[in-house]
Image: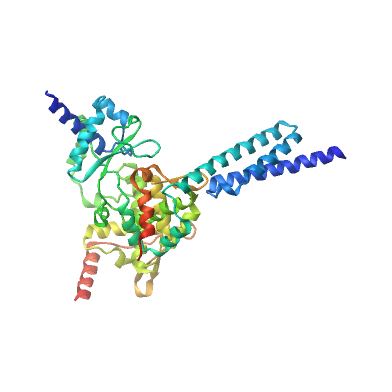
């Protein structure tokens, strides 16, 4: 097999690894990619990224502490790789995936509120803020659901904070800026 | 007398330390401004009290207080970092914005800052092969049932427990479906009572049956109450805002017959109404 064919094959494998979810886990760790694709896996991921960009997607890399990394980073092995849209989605698109306006509003309000409280707050406090906008049954259901999905984290004392998924999926700075700049 | 005084002082000092530990714990757990704790003052007090400690427990309490204070100092550092970062916004301003903006606007704002992880669920070729092998290697007796003609009267209704036992349904999945259905009832009824038949009716007969099945669980699990107006032959559903499991003592079983004829009757009634 010539070199080009080898790389093409590896790009396909990388795409499968990044797209297909295994059990409940999403994303792939750098060391997992290294094990399957070899030492130069960052190059293969780069090639996959070029292909994905053509269809509005991109490979995103986040370090263990929730910071976005580049392919040139020296700590890729422990980082999490996944595929995300390169642009923002429309309401219609997300509604097709089972998300409701209420779900998105709960997440927006919770993340923004937690930010004003230095990242953590009592669940009851967050619930009180949300209940002003949404029915009580939806507030509790959504908070529990977002904790299960990893967008929020709750400790045994009922303290809520943003979860790993918020760190990697949500640009919190943009969220706050837009929230403050939007007028109705 | 003086010994007693010293013992009393020790007790008061212990209480001071316990209060300090509780304050630090509260700051740590509730996300309160860590600068509410006067660290320098607290350290000075601890240093003064150190001379009074005699027992092992008292020294442990002293160490615990120092440990809690050090965590507060760490929180103060994080607090300053957050305030100086680009993520910091005036809390009151954010709260007033949250209150003013509609759900739709909040959702749209969120979408602009959200890049969700894309993932697909699949069955691998290996797992398919495994399943095929399992199927092929099943003993022939297992298929005898297939040869037996199934008579409709032999069919039995599968309960939720039966579906869970056969692993056709997952508990978590069922509860999620049920909760979504409850939300639908709340949305549709606006929290008021609604006609049972209007709520379970669907354009497809199959869905009509599924809705009736789920509604029976809504009532059994305390997400809604059933109200009967026997004189007028009407049935109403009254959604609860907080689910409450009905007690065995107060619960009643009500059989509501469902069949194709009833569905056709409801459909006909709707067509007439629609003109």
**Is A5 positioned to the left or the right of B200 in the image?**
left
B191 up-or-down from B9: above or below: below
Q: Is residue B138 visible?
A: no
Q: Residue at x 71, y 41 (%)?
A: B14
Picture residue at 15% right of the left edge, 31% below the top: A8
Residue at point 17%, 28% (across, down): A7
Residue nearer the viewer, B88 or B133: B88
Task: Name the foreground residue: A118 vs B143.
Answer: A118
Spot occupied by residue A52 in the image (x, y as percentages of width and height)? 20, 41
Quadrant housing residue B5: top right
Q: Nearer the viewer, residue B251 or A69?
A: A69
At x 48%, y 51%, the residue is: A117
Which residue lies most toward the top here? A1
Residue A153 horizontal/vertical position (percent): 44, 45
Q: Residue B73: name its quadrant.
A: top right
Q: Give the left or right position of residue B97, taking residue B259 as reference.
A: right
Q: Position of residue A83 (x, y in %)?
A: 26, 41
């Amino acid at each position: 097999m010539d070199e080009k064919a080898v790389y093409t094959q590896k790009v396909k494998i990388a795409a499968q690894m990044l797209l297909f979810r295994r059990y409940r886990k999403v994303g792939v760790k750098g060391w997992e990619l290294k094990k399957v694709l070899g030492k130069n896996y960052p190059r293969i991921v780069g090639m996959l990224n070029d292909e994905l960009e053509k269809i509005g997607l991109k490979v995103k890399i986040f370090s263990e502490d929730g910071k976005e990394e580049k392919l040139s980073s020296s700590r890729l092995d422990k980082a999490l790789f996944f595929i995300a849209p390169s642009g923002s989605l429309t309401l219609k698109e997300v509604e097709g995936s089972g998300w409701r306006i209420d779900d998105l509003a709960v997440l927006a309000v919770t993340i923004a509120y937690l930010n004003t409280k230095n990242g953590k707050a009592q669940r009851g406090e967050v619930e009180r803020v949300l209940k002003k906008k949404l029915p009580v049954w939806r507030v509790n259901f959504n908070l529990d659901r977002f904790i299960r999905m990893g967008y929020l984290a709750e400790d045994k004392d009922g303290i809520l904070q943003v979860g790993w998924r918020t760190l990697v999926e949500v640009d919190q700075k943009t969220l706050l800026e837009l929230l403050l700049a939007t007028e109705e | 007398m003086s010994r007693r005084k010293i013992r009393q002082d020790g007790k008061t000092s212990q209480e001071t330390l316990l209060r300090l530990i509780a304050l630090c714990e509260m700051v740590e757990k509730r996300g309160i401004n860590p600068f509410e704790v006067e660290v320098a003052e607290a350290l000075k007090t601890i240093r003064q009290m150190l001379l009074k400690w005699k027992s092992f427990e008292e020294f442990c309490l002293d160490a615990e207080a120092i440990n809690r204070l050090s965590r507060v100092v760490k929180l103060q550092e994080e607090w300053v970092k957050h305030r100086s970062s680009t993520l910091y916004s005036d809390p009151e301003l954010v709260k007033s914005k949250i209150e003013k903006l509609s759900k739709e606007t909040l959702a749209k704002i969120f979408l602009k800052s959200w890049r969700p992880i894309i993932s697909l669920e699949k069955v691998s070729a290996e797992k398919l092969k495994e399943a095929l092998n399992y199927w092929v290697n099943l003993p022939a007796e297992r298929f005898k049932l297939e040869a037996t003609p199934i008579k409709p009267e032999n069919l039995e209704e599968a309960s939720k427990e039966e579906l869970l036992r056969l692993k056709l349904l997952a508990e978590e999945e069922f509860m999620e479906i049920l909760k979504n259905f409850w939300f639908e009832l709340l949305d549709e009824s606006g929290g008021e009572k609604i006609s049972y038949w209007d709520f379970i009716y669907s354009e497809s007969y199959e869905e009509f049956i599924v809705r009736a099945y789920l509604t029976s669980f809504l009532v059994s699990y305390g997400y809604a109450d059933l109200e009967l107006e026997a004189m007028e032959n009407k049935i109403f559903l009254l959604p609860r805002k907080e689910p409450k499991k009905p007690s065995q003592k107060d619960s009643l079983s009500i059989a509501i017959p469902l069949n194709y004829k009833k569905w056709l009757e409801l459909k006909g009634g709707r067509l007439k109404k629609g003109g």
